[in-house]
Image (cartoon, rainbow, N blue to C red):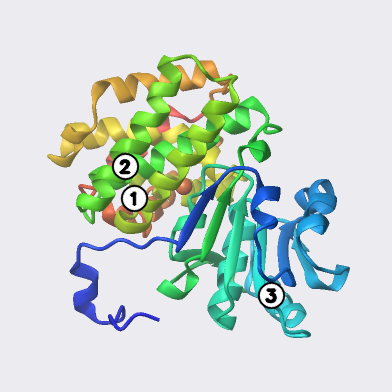
Amino acid sequence: MSVINQTNRLFGMLKKGFFPRMILLGPLQNYLKTLDKKDCFIVASKTVLEAKKEMLKAGLEFEDEDVFTFQGEPTNIILEDCMTAYSKKTYSFIFAIGGGSVIDLAKALKSKTSSELVVVPTTPGTGSEVTTFAIITDENNVKQVLNGEELMPDAVILDKTFLMSLPKETLGVMIFDILGHAMEARVSKFSNPFSDNFAEQAIRIIMRGLGNAVLDKEEYLEQIQIAGVLAGSAQGIAYTGLAHGFAHQIGPVLKIGHAKAVSIFLKDVMELNIANSEAGKKIKKGWIDNLDKIYSLFGLEKVQLKLENKDELAEKIQKDICTRTNPFRPTPDQILEILNKHEI
Ligand SMILES: [Fe+2]
Protein backbone atom coordinates (compact mmCIF):
# COMPACT_ATOMS: atom_id res chain seq x y z
CA MET A 1 0.00 0.00 0.00
CA SER A 2 1.34 3.40 -0.95
CA VAL A 3 1.89 6.22 1.56
CA ILE A 4 0.30 8.54 -1.00
CA ASN A 5 -3.36 8.90 -0.18
CA GLN A 6 -5.46 8.14 -3.23
CA THR A 7 -8.68 9.19 -1.53
CA ASN A 8 -7.36 12.74 -1.04
CA ARG A 9 -9.19 14.98 -3.53
CA LEU A 10 -5.85 16.52 -4.58
CA PHE A 11 -4.71 13.09 -5.79
CA GLY A 12 -7.09 13.32 -8.76
CA MET A 13 -5.20 16.31 -10.12
CA LEU A 14 -1.75 14.70 -10.06
CA LYS A 15 0.07 13.64 -13.22
CA LYS A 16 0.38 10.01 -12.33
CA GLY A 17 0.67 6.51 -13.73
CA PHE A 18 0.01 3.03 -12.36
CA PHE A 19 1.83 -0.07 -13.51
CA PRO A 20 2.07 -3.77 -12.60
CA ARG A 21 5.31 -4.81 -10.87
CA MET A 22 6.35 -6.89 -13.88
CA ILE A 23 5.24 -7.62 -17.43
CA LEU A 24 6.65 -10.74 -19.03
CA LEU A 25 6.54 -11.43 -22.74
CA GLY A 26 6.86 -14.98 -24.07
CA PRO A 27 5.66 -18.55 -23.63
CA LEU A 28 3.65 -19.07 -20.43
CA GLN A 29 5.19 -22.47 -19.71
CA ASN A 30 8.67 -20.95 -19.51
CA TYR A 31 7.56 -18.50 -16.82
CA LEU A 32 5.68 -21.19 -14.90
CA LYS A 33 9.00 -23.04 -14.56
CA THR A 34 10.50 -20.06 -12.72
CA LEU A 35 7.87 -19.91 -9.94
CA ASP A 36 9.17 -20.37 -6.38
CA LYS A 37 5.77 -21.42 -5.08
CA LYS A 38 3.29 -23.27 -7.23
CA ASP A 39 0.19 -23.66 -5.05
CA CYS A 40 -2.39 -21.16 -6.24
CA PHE A 41 -6.05 -20.32 -6.58
CA ILE A 42 -7.03 -20.16 -10.25
CA VAL A 43 -9.64 -17.86 -11.76
CA ALA A 44 -10.27 -18.83 -15.37
CA SER A 45 -12.69 -18.92 -18.23
CA LYS A 46 -14.09 -22.43 -18.75
CA THR A 47 -12.90 -22.75 -22.33
CA VAL A 48 -9.34 -21.65 -21.62
CA LEU A 49 -9.10 -23.94 -18.60
CA GLU A 50 -10.30 -26.93 -20.60
CA ALA A 51 -7.87 -26.21 -23.42
CA LYS A 52 -4.84 -25.45 -21.25
CA LYS A 53 -5.36 -27.60 -18.14
CA GLU A 54 -2.49 -29.93 -18.98
CA MET A 55 -0.06 -27.10 -19.53
CA LEU A 56 -1.14 -25.41 -16.29
CA LYS A 57 -0.87 -28.71 -14.36
CA ALA A 58 2.74 -29.01 -15.50
CA GLY A 59 3.64 -25.65 -13.96
CA LEU A 60 1.18 -25.06 -11.11
CA GLU A 61 -0.17 -27.08 -8.17
CA PHE A 62 -3.96 -27.14 -7.98
CA GLU A 63 -6.93 -29.45 -7.59
CA ASP A 64 -10.43 -28.96 -8.99
CA GLU A 65 -11.59 -27.16 -5.81
CA ASP A 66 -8.80 -24.61 -6.24
CA VAL A 67 -10.25 -23.43 -9.55
CA PHE A 68 -13.05 -20.91 -10.02
CA THR A 69 -14.59 -20.66 -13.48
CA PHE A 70 -17.56 -18.63 -14.61
CA GLN A 71 -19.21 -17.38 -17.78
CA GLY A 72 -20.37 -13.94 -18.80
CA GLU A 73 -19.53 -10.77 -16.94
CA PRO A 74 -18.59 -10.73 -13.25
CA THR A 75 -21.31 -9.76 -10.79
CA ASN A 76 -21.38 -9.15 -7.04
CA ILE A 77 -22.80 -12.65 -6.58
CA ILE A 78 -20.06 -14.26 -8.67
CA LEU A 79 -17.46 -12.32 -6.65
CA GLU A 80 -18.98 -13.59 -3.39
CA ASP A 81 -18.93 -17.20 -4.70
CA CYS A 82 -15.34 -16.73 -5.79
CA MET A 83 -14.35 -15.39 -2.35
CA THR A 84 -16.08 -18.33 -0.66
CA ALA A 85 -14.15 -20.79 -2.83
CA TYR A 86 -10.87 -18.92 -2.19
CA SER A 87 -11.31 -18.79 1.60
CA LYS A 88 -11.42 -22.59 2.05
CA LYS A 89 -7.61 -22.89 1.93
CA THR A 90 -4.47 -20.79 2.11
CA TYR A 91 -2.79 -20.10 -1.22
CA SER A 92 0.56 -18.59 -2.17
CA PHE A 93 -1.01 -16.49 -4.92
CA ILE A 94 -3.96 -16.02 -7.31
CA PHE A 95 -3.47 -16.98 -10.95
CA ALA A 96 -5.96 -15.62 -13.52
CA ILE A 97 -6.14 -16.76 -17.12
CA GLY A 98 -8.79 -15.51 -19.56
CA GLY A 99 -10.27 -12.35 -21.05
CA GLY A 100 -11.10 -9.03 -19.43
CA SER A 101 -14.02 -10.38 -17.35
CA VAL A 102 -11.84 -13.07 -15.76
CA ILE A 103 -9.09 -10.57 -15.02
CA ASP A 104 -11.58 -8.08 -13.55
CA LEU A 105 -12.98 -10.72 -11.19
CA ALA A 106 -9.48 -11.81 -10.12
CA LYS A 107 -8.52 -8.18 -9.46
CA ALA A 108 -11.62 -7.68 -7.32
CA LEU A 109 -10.72 -10.87 -5.42
CA LYS A 110 -7.13 -9.69 -4.94
CA SER A 111 -8.33 -6.36 -3.53
CA LYS A 112 -10.31 -8.19 -0.86
CA THR A 113 -7.60 -10.69 0.04
CA SER A 114 -4.28 -8.81 -0.42
CA SER A 115 -2.95 -11.88 -2.21
CA GLU A 116 -0.47 -11.53 -5.06
CA LEU A 117 -2.05 -11.79 -8.50
CA VAL A 118 -0.50 -13.15 -11.70
CA VAL A 119 -2.62 -12.60 -14.84
CA VAL A 120 -2.42 -14.16 -18.29
CA PRO A 121 -4.69 -12.31 -20.73
CA THR A 122 -5.97 -14.50 -23.55
CA THR A 123 -7.45 -11.57 -25.47
CA PRO A 124 -5.46 -8.46 -26.33
CA GLY A 125 -7.83 -5.51 -26.18
CA THR A 126 -9.27 -4.87 -22.73
CA GLY A 127 -6.18 -3.45 -21.03
CA SER A 128 -7.56 -4.77 -17.72
CA GLU A 129 -4.19 -6.40 -16.98
CA VAL A 130 -2.59 -2.96 -16.48
CA THR A 131 -5.29 -0.83 -14.88
CA THR A 132 -6.37 -0.23 -11.29
CA PHE A 133 -10.06 -0.68 -12.04
CA ALA A 134 -12.45 -3.58 -12.45
CA ILE A 135 -16.06 -3.60 -13.59
CA ILE A 136 -18.43 -5.66 -11.44
CA THR A 137 -22.19 -5.66 -12.10
CA ASP A 138 -24.33 -5.13 -9.00
CA GLU A 139 -27.68 -6.69 -8.01
CA ASN A 140 -29.58 -3.93 -9.91
CA ASN A 141 -27.75 -4.86 -13.12
CA VAL A 142 -25.69 -1.66 -12.95
CA LYS A 143 -22.00 -1.86 -13.82
CA GLN A 144 -19.95 -0.62 -10.88
CA VAL A 145 -16.35 0.46 -11.35
CA LEU A 146 -14.04 -0.61 -8.53
CA ASN A 147 -10.90 1.51 -8.52
CA GLY A 148 -7.77 1.44 -6.37
CA GLU A 149 -4.09 0.64 -6.33
CA GLU A 150 -4.88 -2.66 -4.60
CA LEU A 151 -6.56 -3.91 -7.81
CA MET A 152 -3.42 -3.72 -9.95
CA PRO A 153 -2.07 -7.18 -10.89
CA ASP A 154 1.45 -7.93 -9.62
CA ALA A 155 2.65 -9.76 -12.72
CA VAL A 156 1.33 -9.96 -16.28
CA ILE A 157 2.37 -12.70 -18.70
CA LEU A 158 1.76 -11.97 -22.38
CA ASP A 159 1.88 -15.15 -24.44
CA LYS A 160 0.97 -14.54 -28.08
CA THR A 161 0.02 -18.17 -28.68
CA PHE A 162 -3.31 -17.52 -26.92
CA LEU A 163 -4.20 -15.07 -29.70
CA MET A 164 -3.51 -17.50 -32.51
CA SER A 165 -6.88 -19.21 -32.26
CA LEU A 166 -8.90 -15.97 -32.23
CA PRO A 167 -11.12 -15.54 -35.30
CA LYS A 168 -10.03 -12.74 -37.61
CA GLU A 169 -13.11 -10.62 -36.93
CA THR A 170 -12.66 -10.94 -33.14
CA LEU A 171 -9.08 -9.78 -33.48
CA GLY A 172 -10.27 -6.87 -35.65
CA VAL A 173 -12.79 -5.58 -33.08
CA MET A 174 -10.22 -6.02 -30.30
CA ILE A 175 -7.85 -3.82 -32.30
CA PHE A 176 -10.64 -1.25 -32.35
CA ASP A 177 -10.93 -1.45 -28.56
CA ILE A 178 -7.16 -0.91 -28.26
CA LEU A 179 -7.38 2.09 -30.60
CA GLY A 180 -10.42 3.31 -28.68
CA HIS A 181 -8.44 3.31 -25.42
CA ALA A 182 -5.44 4.96 -27.06
CA MET A 183 -7.25 7.63 -29.13
CA GLU A 184 -9.72 8.53 -26.40
CA ALA A 185 -6.95 8.71 -23.79
CA ARG A 186 -4.91 10.86 -26.18
CA VAL A 187 -7.61 13.54 -26.32
CA SER A 188 -9.03 12.99 -22.81
CA LYS A 189 -9.46 15.85 -20.36
CA PHE A 190 -7.32 13.78 -17.94
CA SER A 191 -4.44 13.13 -20.36
CA ASN A 192 -0.93 13.74 -19.10
CA PRO A 193 2.59 13.20 -20.52
CA PHE A 194 2.59 9.51 -19.48
CA SER A 195 -0.76 8.68 -21.06
CA ASP A 196 0.05 10.74 -24.18
CA ASN A 197 3.19 8.76 -24.90
CA PHE A 198 1.62 5.37 -24.19
CA ALA A 199 -1.35 6.24 -26.39
CA GLU A 200 0.73 7.55 -29.31
CA GLN A 201 2.98 4.50 -29.27
CA ALA A 202 0.04 2.08 -29.10
CA ILE A 203 -1.55 3.73 -32.14
CA ARG A 204 1.75 3.70 -34.05
CA ILE A 205 2.32 0.00 -33.38
CA ILE A 206 -1.15 -0.94 -34.66
CA MET A 207 -0.90 1.29 -37.72
CA ARG A 208 2.65 0.18 -38.58
CA GLY A 209 1.50 -3.43 -38.59
CA LEU A 210 -1.28 -2.61 -41.02
CA GLY A 211 1.11 -0.77 -43.33
CA ASN A 212 3.60 -3.64 -43.38
CA ALA A 213 0.84 -6.12 -44.09
CA VAL A 214 2.11 -8.51 -41.42
CA LEU A 215 -1.40 -9.37 -40.29
CA ASP A 216 -0.99 -13.11 -40.60
CA LYS A 217 2.31 -13.26 -38.84
CA GLU A 218 2.75 -14.24 -35.22
CA GLU A 219 4.94 -11.22 -34.77
CA TYR A 220 1.96 -8.93 -35.32
CA LEU A 221 -0.01 -10.77 -32.62
CA GLU A 222 2.74 -9.95 -30.15
CA GLN A 223 2.72 -6.35 -31.34
CA ILE A 224 -1.03 -6.22 -30.75
CA GLN A 225 -0.49 -7.47 -27.18
CA ILE A 226 2.12 -4.79 -26.57
CA ALA A 227 -0.12 -2.11 -28.08
CA GLY A 228 -2.96 -3.40 -25.86
CA VAL A 229 -0.82 -2.97 -22.75
CA LEU A 230 0.30 0.53 -23.78
CA ALA A 231 -3.24 1.59 -24.66
CA GLY A 232 -4.50 0.03 -21.41
CA SER A 233 -1.93 2.05 -19.46
CA ALA A 234 -3.01 5.23 -21.26
CA GLN A 235 -6.65 4.42 -20.46
CA GLY A 236 -5.75 3.61 -16.85
CA ILE A 237 -4.27 7.09 -16.47
CA ALA A 238 -6.46 9.30 -18.67
CA TYR A 239 -9.68 7.26 -18.94
CA THR A 240 -11.66 7.19 -22.20
CA GLY A 241 -14.39 9.29 -23.84
CA LEU A 242 -17.58 9.39 -25.87
CA ALA A 243 -16.98 6.23 -27.95
CA HIS A 244 -16.82 4.27 -24.70
CA GLY A 245 -19.91 6.16 -23.51
CA PHE A 246 -21.72 4.83 -26.60
CA ALA A 247 -20.38 1.30 -26.02
CA HIS A 248 -21.42 1.24 -22.34
CA GLN A 249 -24.96 2.36 -23.03
CA ILE A 250 -25.66 0.58 -26.34
CA GLY A 251 -23.78 -2.67 -25.70
CA PRO A 252 -25.99 -4.09 -22.91
CA VAL A 253 -29.27 -2.86 -24.50
CA LEU A 254 -28.62 -4.41 -27.92
CA LYS A 255 -26.43 -7.28 -26.65
CA ILE A 256 -23.40 -6.10 -28.59
CA GLY A 257 -19.99 -6.95 -27.13
CA HIS A 258 -17.89 -4.07 -25.81
CA ALA A 259 -15.16 -4.12 -28.47
CA LYS A 260 -17.67 -4.46 -31.30
CA ALA A 261 -19.64 -1.50 -29.94
CA VAL A 262 -16.45 0.60 -29.81
CA SER A 263 -15.71 -0.38 -33.42
CA ILE A 264 -19.09 0.99 -34.53
CA PHE A 265 -18.66 4.46 -33.01
CA LEU A 266 -14.94 5.24 -32.77
CA LYS A 267 -14.55 6.92 -36.16
CA ASP A 268 -17.64 9.14 -35.77
CA VAL A 269 -16.60 10.18 -32.27
CA MET A 270 -13.06 11.05 -33.35
CA GLU A 271 -14.37 13.12 -36.28
CA LEU A 272 -16.71 14.91 -33.86
CA ASN A 273 -13.79 15.58 -31.48
CA ILE A 274 -11.62 16.88 -34.32
CA ALA A 275 -14.38 19.30 -35.38
CA ASN A 276 -15.26 20.50 -31.89
CA SER A 277 -12.15 20.56 -29.70
CA GLU A 278 -8.58 21.75 -29.63
CA ALA A 279 -7.50 18.32 -28.29
CA GLY A 280 -9.08 16.70 -31.35
CA LYS A 281 -6.20 18.13 -33.42
CA LYS A 282 -3.93 15.49 -31.84
CA ILE A 283 -5.76 12.87 -33.93
CA LYS A 284 -4.02 12.47 -37.29
CA LYS A 285 -6.02 12.11 -40.50
CA GLY A 286 -4.08 8.95 -41.40
CA TRP A 287 -5.28 7.30 -38.20
CA ILE A 288 -8.91 7.98 -39.13
CA ASP A 289 -8.37 6.64 -42.67
CA ASN A 290 -6.85 3.47 -41.21
CA LEU A 291 -10.00 2.78 -39.19
CA ASP A 292 -11.77 2.04 -42.49
CA LYS A 293 -8.82 -0.06 -43.58
CA ILE A 294 -9.08 -2.22 -40.43
CA TYR A 295 -12.76 -2.84 -41.21
CA SER A 296 -11.92 -4.29 -44.61
CA LEU A 297 -8.66 -6.06 -43.62
CA PHE A 298 -10.35 -7.97 -40.81
CA GLY A 299 -13.64 -8.51 -42.62
CA LEU A 300 -15.72 -6.58 -40.10
CA GLU A 301 -19.36 -6.19 -40.98
CA LYS A 302 -21.08 -2.82 -40.70
CA VAL A 303 -23.79 -3.14 -38.06
CA GLN A 304 -27.17 -1.45 -38.44
CA LEU A 305 -28.82 -0.86 -35.08
CA LYS A 306 -32.48 -1.23 -34.19
CA LEU A 307 -32.91 1.61 -31.75
CA GLU A 308 -35.78 2.56 -29.46
CA ASN A 309 -36.15 5.58 -27.16
CA LYS A 310 -33.31 7.35 -28.92
CA ASP A 311 -33.71 10.63 -27.00
CA GLU A 312 -33.41 8.82 -23.68
CA LEU A 313 -30.45 6.82 -24.98
CA ALA A 314 -28.67 9.98 -26.17
CA GLU A 315 -29.12 11.49 -22.73
CA LYS A 316 -27.69 8.39 -21.05
CA ILE A 317 -24.69 8.44 -23.41
CA GLN A 318 -24.11 12.11 -22.65
CA LYS A 319 -24.16 11.39 -18.91
CA ASP A 320 -22.08 8.19 -19.07
CA ILE A 321 -19.00 8.24 -16.80
CA CYS A 322 -16.70 7.73 -19.83
CA THR A 323 -18.19 10.68 -21.71
CA ARG A 324 -17.15 12.96 -18.83
CA THR A 325 -13.49 12.83 -19.91
CA ASN A 326 -14.25 13.41 -23.60
CA PRO A 327 -12.40 16.58 -24.71
CA PHE A 328 -15.69 18.45 -25.06
CA ARG A 329 -19.22 17.82 -23.81
CA PRO A 330 -21.34 16.65 -26.75
CA THR A 331 -24.95 17.83 -27.03
CA PRO A 332 -27.77 15.25 -27.19
CA ASP A 333 -28.33 16.35 -30.82
CA GLN A 334 -24.73 15.55 -31.75
CA ILE A 335 -25.11 12.13 -30.14
CA LEU A 336 -28.44 11.56 -31.92
CA GLU A 337 -26.83 12.43 -35.25
CA ILE A 338 -24.30 9.62 -34.75
CA LEU A 339 -27.00 7.19 -33.62
CA ASN A 340 -29.08 8.00 -36.73
CA LYS A 341 -26.14 7.11 -39.00
CA HIS A 342 -26.13 3.58 -37.62
CA GLU A 343 -29.86 2.98 -37.38
CA ILE A 344 -31.57 0.44 -39.63
FE1 LIG B 1 -12.71 -0.52 -24.09
- Residue bearing the label numbered 3: 77
Amino acid type of the residue that numbered disc 1 sits on in the rendered structure: Ala
Q: Earlier in the sequence, mark 1 or mark 2?
A: 2
Dots 1, 2 in contact, CB < 8 A? yes
Q: Is residue 83 left or right of residue 171?
A: right
Camera-nearest label, 1 or 3: 1
Residue 329: % across, % down: 22, 50
Q: CA distance from mark 1 to mark 3?
A: 30 Å
Query: Quadrant of residue 97 in the image?
Result: bottom right
Query: Quadrant of residue 38 in the image?
Result: bottom right
Q: Is residue 98 left or right of residue 135?
A: right
**For residue 199, which numbered disc appears in the image?**
2
Q: Is residue 156 above or below residue 41?
A: above
Q: Is residue 121 left or right of residue 130?
A: right
| Residue 169 in sight in this render | yes
Residue 10: % across, % down: 19, 76
